[in-house]
């Protein structure tokens, strides 16, 4: 997983999996889900992030547990 912030477009991008994006769906104003060819969510974009996420510079990322949940594979 990779999380990036682009100050030029004021967008937070969350990539859950590094695959080709087949479709994007704006499920809420300024909130976009990226889907792969099998319509699985593989990422998100948060537009106008400075209005939605306060204190971006203080974001804390945590990793909990080991491996993938429910026997999923990283394929």
Image: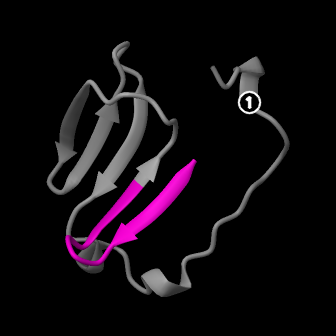
Residue position for label 1: 69
**Extreme-right residue of the structure:** 66
> Above or below — where is 49 with respect to 37?
below
Residue depicted at 44% across the width and 81% down the height: 56
The location of residue 10, given as percent across then percent down, is: 24, 73
Which is more toward the observer, 9 or 29? Answer: 9
Residue depicted at 21% across the width and 41% down the height: 27
Q: Horizontally, is 72 left or right of 65 in the view?
A: left
Q: Which SS type dominates the magenta stretch?
A: strand
Residue depicted at 36% across the width and 47% down the height: 44
Q: Quarter-wise, where is residue 29 in the image?
A: bottom left
Which is more toward the observer, 28 or 68? Answer: 68
**Extreme-left residue of the structure:** 29
Q: Horizontally, is 47 left or right of 37 in the view?
A: left
Residue 10 in the magenta stretch? The answer is yes
Colour scheme: one colour
> Above or below — where is 74 with respect to 54?
above
Quadrant where the image shows the C terminus: top right
The location of residue 4, given as percent across then percent down, is: 44, 64
Q: Quarter-wise, where is residue 12 in the image?
A: bottom left
The location of residue 15, given as percent across then percent down, is: 46, 46
> Above or below — where is 35 with respect to 66?
above
Magenta-drawn segment: 1-13
Q: Horizontally, is 46 left or right of 27 in the view?
A: right
**Extreme-top residue of the structure:** 38
């Amino acid at each position: 997983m990779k999380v990036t912030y682009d100050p030029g477009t004021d967008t937070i991008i969350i990539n859950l999996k590094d695959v080709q994006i087949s479709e994007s769906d704006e499920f809420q104003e300024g909130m976009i889900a990226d889907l792969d060819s099998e319509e699985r969510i593989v990422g998100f974009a948060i537009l106008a992030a400075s209005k939605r996420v306060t204190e971006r510079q203080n974001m804390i990322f945590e990793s909990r547990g080991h491996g993938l949940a429910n026997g999923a594979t990283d394929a």
